Amino acid sequence: MKLALLVCAAWVVLTVSSSGCHDPAANVGLVELNTQTLDAPATIAPGTTLTVGLNVEVGGCFIFDHIQSQRTASQVDLTVWGRDIRTGITDRGILCPRFVVESHEYQLDPPFQNPFTVVIGRGRISPLIAVVHVQ
C-alpha cells in the first residue's frame, strides 16, 4: 500500500512539475497578442544563448501575460499571450486606453541546429519569421 501511494505521489509531482509555468490548458481565457516586430541576430556562435526581442502590442484593454514556446532542434514557435482586463466585469463599463508597444525579450539555451528558425505566431495575421545562422 505504501509503495502504491509513493508511486501515485511521484506521478502527481512529475506531472505537475513537467508542465512548466504555463501549460496549454492555462491559456483558457487568454488572447493572442499581436507582435509587431521580431528582433533576432543574423548569426550566433555555437553554444551561445540566443536572445530575441519582441515588440508586443498591448493596451486597448489587453495586458501582457506570458510567452509560450514549442521548440525542436531547428526551430522555436513562440506565441505571446495576454489578458483582457474586462473579463468578468459586468456591472460597469470600462474605458480602454490606446494601444502601445511593449518590448519583451525571450532567451533560448543551446544547442541549436544551423540554421535555427524563430517563428512568432500572430493568430490570423501571417507569422513573423527570423532565421539565425549558427557559425
Image (cartoon, helix red, strand yellow):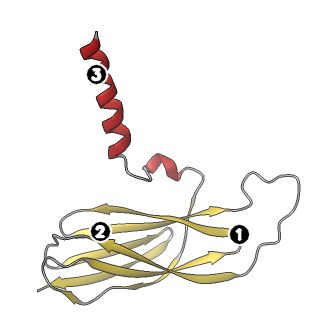
Q: Which residue is mark 2?
A: 76
Badge 3 density bin: few <14, some 14–19, many ≥20, Cα 10 Å: few
Instruction: Name the amino acid, label 3.
Output: Leu
Res 14 → quadrant: top left
- Between 66 and 78, the residue placed more toward the observer is 66
Q: Assess whether mark 1 and mark 2 are in contact (beta carbons under 8 angstroms).
A: no
Residue 82 x %, y %: 57, 64
Residue 52 x, y percent position in the rendering: 35, 80
Element type at mark 3: helix
Question: In what element is the residue under mark 1?
Answer: loop
What amino acid is found at the position of numbered circle 2 in the picture? Val
Circle 3 sits on which residue? Answer: 6
Give the distance between the C-alpha atoms of the residues marked 3 and 2, in whole angstroms.
36 Å
Q: Which residue is mark 1?
A: 61
Q: Which residue appears farthest toward the top when viewing the image?
A: 1
Q: Tell which circle, 2 or 1, labels the residue nearer the N-terminal end.
A: 1
For the residues labelled 1 and 3, say whether their Cβ atoms are less than 8 Å apart.
Answer: no
Q: Position of residue 130 (x, y in %)?
A: 31, 82
**Cβ atoms under marks 3 and 2 closer than 8 Å:** no
| Of the two numbered discs 1 and 3 in the rendering, the one whose residue sits closer to the viewer | 3
Q: Amino acid at mark 1?
A: Cys
- In which quadrant is the C terminus drawn? bottom left
Residue 46 x, y percent position in the rendering: 12, 80
Does residue 77 lie above or below 3 as drawn?
Answer: below
User: How far apart are the two marked residues, 2 and 1, measured between alpha carbons?
Assistant: 28 Å
Residue at screen point 83% across, 52% down: 90
- Residue 1 shown left or right of residue 22 in the figure: left
Tell me what residue is drawn at x 40 percent, y 73 percent.
120
Q: Earlier in the sequence, mark 3 or mark 2?
A: 3
Residue found 35% across the figure and 43% down from its top: 17
Q: Residues within 10 Å of mark 2 (few under 14, many from 20)?
A: some
